[in-house]
Image (cartoon, grey):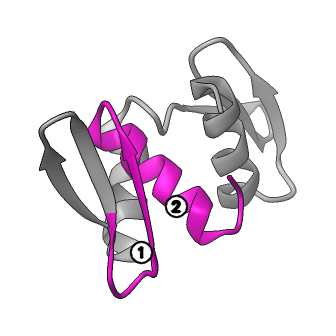
C-alpha cells in the first residue's frame, strides 16, 4: 500500500461516516459546519500516537527498520519508520492488508 492508501484506509475507520478527501500526503476530514482536520497517520506522531496508545501497539527498532505489534495483538508489521509500521499494524488488526 502507498502512504496515501494507508492514510485513507485508517481515516475511513477512525472517521466513519465523515466526508474524506485524499491528498498526496494527508487526508482532509470534514467534521461539519465548515470545520475540517487533516490527518497523516504514516508520518505524524500526533495522528498515529493516540491509536498506538489506545490499541497497545508496541514498537521495536530493527536493523532494517521498525516493527509494530505485540504478542497480545496477534499481528505485526514492519516498515522503514515507526509511524508507518504502527499504521500498517493497525490496518492488519482491522483485517486490511
Measuring from the top left, give residue 73's x and y in whole percent.
Answer: 42, 81
Q: Judge by depth and name the residue closer to the eye, 74 or 13.
A: 74
| Left or right for 26, reference 30 | left
Q: Judge by depth and name the residue closer to the eye, 28 or 26.
A: 26
Kindly state the secondary structure of the residue where label 1 is placed: helix
Image quadrant where residue 2 sits? top right
Could you classify mark 2 by the number of other residues whose Cα lies within 10 Å: few (under 14), some (14-19), or many (20 or more)? many
Dot 2 corresponds to which residue?
A: 90
Magenta residues (range): 69-97
Q: Does residue 80 belong to the magenta stretch?
A: yes
Q: Is residue 52 above or below residue 82?
A: below
Measuring from the top left, give residue 16's x and y in whole percent.
Answer: 80, 59
Q: Judge by depth and name the residue closer to the eye, 97 or 91.
A: 97
Q: Is residue 35 above or below residue 91?
A: above
Kindly state the secondary structure of the residue where label 2 is placed: helix
The residue under the point 87% across, 57% down is: 17
Measuring from the top left, give residue 47's x and y in whole percent.
Answer: 43, 44
| Left or right for 56, reference 51 | left
Dot 1 corresponds to which residue?
A: 55
Q: Is residue 65 above or below residue 16?
A: above
Image quadrant where residue 62 sits? top left
The residue under the point 31% across, 30% down is: 80
The residue under the point 39% across, 74% down is: 54
Mark 2 and mark 1 residues within 8 Å of each other at the beta carbon: yes
Measuring from the top left, give residue 10's x and y in whole percent.
Answer: 64, 49
Amino acid at each position: 500500500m502507498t502512504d496515501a492508501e494507508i492514510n485513507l484506509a485508517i481515516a475511513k475507520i477512525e472517521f466513519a461516516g465523515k466526508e474524506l478527501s485524499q491528498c498526496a500526503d494527508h487526508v482532509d476530514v470534514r467534521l461539519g459546519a465548515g470545520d475540517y482536520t487533516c490527518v497523516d497517520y504514516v508520518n505524524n506522531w500526533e495522528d498515529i500516537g493516540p491509536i498506538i496508545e489506545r490499541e497497545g501497539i508496541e514498537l521495536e527498532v530493527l536493523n532494517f527498520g521498525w516493527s509494530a505489534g505485540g504478542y497480545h495483538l496477534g499481528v505485526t508489521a514492519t516498515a522503514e519508520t515507526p509511524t508507518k509500521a504502527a499504521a500498517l499494524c493497525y490496518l492488519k488488526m482491522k483485517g486490511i492488508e
